[in-house]
Amino acid sequence: MKKSLLLLILGACLLLPLFAGGVKEAEPAALPEKPVKIALLNGPSGIGLVNLISEDIFSDPSVEVDVQVLGAPKVLLGQMLKEEWDAAVLPANMAAILFNKGVGYRLAALTGMGNLYLVGSDSLEISSPEDLEGLTIHIPGMNTTPDLVTRLIADEGGLDLNLDYSFNPSDLAKALAGGVADAGVLPEPLATVAMKSSKDLKIVLDMQRLWSETFPDEGDYPLTVLVVKSSFAENWPQLTDELLKAGLESIVWVDENPAEASKLIGEYGFTIPAPVVEQAIPRSNYTFVTGEDLPAVMSPYFQRVFGLDPAAIGGKVPESGLYY
């Protein structure tokens, strides 16, 4: 992961000076009169970008920033439909839904790749995908990334899986730890939360490995993305570039300094314990892809999701206008 991360970082650094070129040229606008509102989620996406809270994002100190950590993606989606945020980190398919609904946001960066694990009882032994048949696999919500990835793998392999959607992500971790659920697909750090709560749990299957075996010609699937309001990017391209630069720097710093990053989590509204965050960061697959590299990473995934369930990305594969 480190090697691929560095390659993506180098590409992002080369592309940063070109970002403004993708925005319609206009007379420089006055600086925002209101704080720039940025939404993070209380999970892997937010952890990777924690420095957006703790560090200065913009070179002009007069630009105020309001970064908030939210707990529920669906709540954030409702607010995004009203264009209440200038920028936000979302699950990848939610960015496509917003675009297809005509909401004014553009996908500006990919912030996280494959980061899902099948967690289950220590007694479970899965030696092949076929062993998953007959097992009740708990999924934290329909059309979430855990759901889409699991169903895409099953569909491609002709597997008949028994999927249960009874628990949200946090409750699923507790259900696994309490023995109420035998197996469930969770992202980090929630996979580690579950295993820390019970010595009888383990990672039964690395979903990234299963994805690569199922789709050998593709890389990891995209997990989380950073979107920017179109009007913000058009009015303040320099601030948009500075936001992306700060995002890149945060991803690199968190990946290289898990102990220090975990200490910040509790200070800024995250509810995941610091020791769990520190242990989970090396398995979280943070990355940062921008500019011309984005469609090549995102489009194959959107194509596959469309073939599985068009509604999961808003009814159609997004056009090139999705990307900043």
Image (cartoon, grey):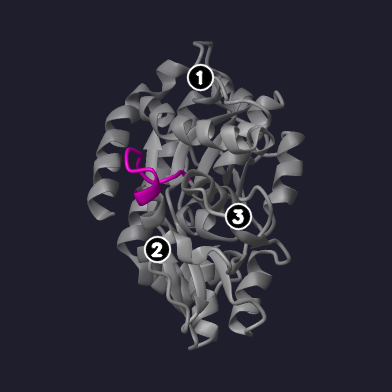
The residue under the point 50% across, 25% down is 323
Pick the residue in front: 239 or 136. 136
Q: Is residue 187 visible?
A: no
Question: Could you tell me the amino acid type at mark 1?
Answer: Ser
Q: Residues within 10 Å of mark 1 (few under 14, many from 20)?
A: few
As measured in the structure, the alpha-carbon distance from the residue carrying label 2 to the one carrying label 1 is: 38 Å
Q: Quadrant of the N terminus?
A: bottom left
Residues shaded magenta: 213-222
- Circle 3 residue: 41
Judge depth for marks 3 and 1 and give the one in front: 1
Q: Quadrant of residue 126?
A: bottom left
Q: Residues within 10 Å of mark 2 (few under 14, many from 20)?
A: few
Q: Earlier in the sequence, mark 3 or mark 1?
A: 3
**Do the residues bearing badges 3 and 1 touch, measured as CB atoms within 8 Å?**
no
Q: Earlier in the sequence, mark 2 or mark 3?
A: 3
SS assignment at label 1: helix
The residue under the point 53% across, 53% down is 159
Q: Give the number of the disc on residue 115.
A: none
SS assignment at label 3: strand
Question: Could you tell me the amino acid type at mark 2?
Answer: Ser
Image position of 20 with respect to 303: above or below: above
- Circle 2 residue: 128
- Circle 1 residue: 320
Q: Is residue 91 visible?
A: yes
Q: Quadrant of residue 35?
A: top right
Pick the residue in front: 308 or 93. 308
Q: Is residue 215 magenta?
A: yes
Lateral position of residue 319 relative to residue 141, left or right = left
Q: Earlier in the sequence, mark 2 or mark 1?
A: 2
Per the picture, the main secondary structure of the magenta-coloured stretch is: loop
